[in-house]
Image (cartoon, helix red, strand yellow):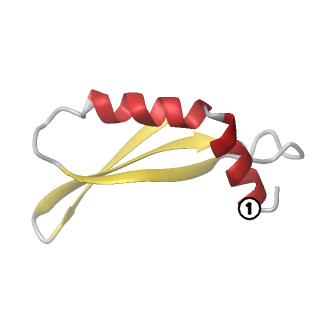
C-alpha cells in the first residue's frame, strides 16, 4: 500500500512517499493517501529503506487511529 510519486520542480527531481489507508468504518471502499516524506531523487531506484519505514508506519494502530480522529471518520 506504499506509493511513490515522482516529479520535477525547476529541473530538480523529487519523490513523495506515502501510503494508502481506509480511515472510514462506514465506507470500506474509501482510500486516503497519507504523505509521509518528500525527498530529492538521487538515483533511478526507489529507496527501499524509506518504503520499509513507511510500510511499518502504515500498520501502526496509533497512526491509523490518529488519521481516523483527525478526519472525523
Question: In the rendered view, would you say 10 is above or below 24?
Answer: below
Side (left or right) of 44 relative to 29: left
The image quadrant that residue 18 belongs to is top left
Q: Position of residue 40 (x, y in %)?
A: 18, 53
Q: Which residue is mark 1?
A: 71
Foreground pick, 29 / 16: 16
Q: Position of residue 36 (x, y in %)?
A: 44, 50
Side (left or right) of 52 relative to 28: left
- Residue 28 can be seen, yes or no: yes
Side (left or right) of 39 relative to 59: left
Foreground pick, 57 / 2: 57
Residue beneath the point at 25% across and 52% down = 39
Residue beneath the point at 39% across and 27% down = 52
- Crowd band around label 1 with a 10 angstrom C-alpha radius: few (<14), some (14–19), many (20+): few
Q: Position of residue 37 (x, y in %)?
A: 37, 51
Residue beneath the point at 10% across and 65% down = 11
- Residue 1 can be seen, yes or no: no
Q: Which residue reaches farthest right? A: 26
Foreground pick, 65 / 42: 65
Q: Which residue reaches farthest bottom? A: 10
Question: In the rendered view, would you say 18 is above or below 52?
Answer: below
Element marked by disc 1 = loop
Amino acid at each position: 500500500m506504499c506509493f511513490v510519486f515522482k516529479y520535477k520542480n525547476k529541473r530538480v527531481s523529487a519523490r513523495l512517499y506515502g501510503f494508502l489507508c481506509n480511515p472510514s468504518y462506514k465506507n470500506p471502499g474509501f482510500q486516503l493517501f497519507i504523505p509521509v516524506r518528500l525527498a530529492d531523487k538521487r538515483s533511478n531506484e526507489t529507496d527501499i529503506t524509506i518504503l520499509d519505514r513507511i510500510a511499518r508506519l502504515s500498520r501502526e494502530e496509533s497512526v491509523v487511529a490518529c488519521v481516523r480522529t483527525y478526519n472525523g471518520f
